[in-house]
Amino acid sequence: QKEVEQDPGPLSVPEGAIVSLNCTYSNSAFQYFMWYRQYSRKGPELLMYTYSSGNKEDGRFTAQVDKSSKYISLFIRDSQPSDSATYLCAMSDDFNKFYFGSGTKLNVKP
Amino acid sequence: EAQVTQNPRYLITVTGKKLTVTCSQNMNHEYMSWYRQDPGLGLRQIYYSMNVEVTDKGDVPEGYKVSRKEKRNFPLILESPSPNQTSLYFCASTPLGRTYEQYFGPGTRLTVT
């Protein structure tokens, strides 16, 4: 069983839609949760970081962590064509070893 | 410009021929890490280093070696590459204590025939 599961998509939405991206995990020791965005032919870049459970908001992006369900989400409001990318969730229990999901490819249509 | 650089960016080689992929960062970061990215499997951590001469295994270290003799460099060594090591490789760095915010290099596409 993989440590982190993520639906690969692709997910196609119209501009302005609310997007929900999700990951599930099996290791209850994970306490650091991250979302990275990866454009085609580029390295990933950090979008959001959350420690333990709860919500965190940054502009149009909201990250949620539900440790009881081992489930994390990233919401994108008012999605833009420039948000079209692959979104990777990542987790860690010790801040040294990291486990990534396989990524969800998002396409926002103008 | 603050950046992580990798060389080469593309490499086609044959089974068993030793190769090294270099990674260098100019941000004075303590923590550096290597990942491979494969379709359907996502990013998987190969090795990481918390500082000079301190390295440890990630999730998929088999068939790889690393060294950290200088703070800025973290080369990835494949002593006897095999076709199952064909992949896209990323190096990343970050200050210690902020390892959630890893800065990734541009990637190295490796094909082993």
Image (tube, rainbow, N blue to C red):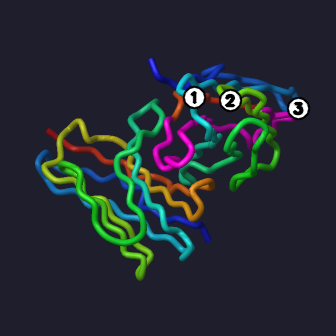
Q: Mark 1 lies on which chain?
A: B
**Discs 1 and 3 share one subunit:** yes
Direction from residue A68 to residue A59 in the image, left or right: left
The reply to whether the C-beta atoms of the residues labelled 2 and 1 are less than 8 Å apart is yes
Task: Identify residue for label 2.
Answer: B71
Direction from residue A29 to residue A58 in the image, left or right: left
Q: How far apart are marks 3 and 2 (CA)?
A: 29 Å
Q: Distance between the residues labelled 2 and 1?
A: 7 Å
Q: Residue at left 71%, top 23%?
A: B12
Q: Residue at left 55%, top 61%?
A: A92
Q: Mark 3 lies on which chain?
A: B
- In magenta, the rendered stretch is B77-103
Task: Identify residue for label 1.
Answer: B28
Q: Which of marks 1 and 3 is nearer the N terminus?
A: 3
The reply to whether the C-beta atoms of the residues labelled 3 and 2 are less than 8 Å apart is no
Between B7 and B72, the residue placed more toward the observer is B72
Direction from residue B54 to residue A82 in the image, left or right: left
Whether residue B81 appears in magenta in the rendering, the answer is yes
Q: Say which amino acid is labelled 2.
A: Lys
Measuring from the top left, give residue A70's x and y in whole percent. 44, 76
Between B4 and A18, the residue placed more toward the observer is B4
Disc ID at residue B16? 3
Q: Say which amino acid is labelled 1.
A: Asn
Task: Identify the image quadrant of residue B64.
Answer: top right
Q: How far apart are marks 1 and 3 (CA)?
A: 34 Å
Quarter of the image with the C terminus of chain A is top left
Q: From the image, state whether disc 1 or disc 3 is nearer to you.
A: 1
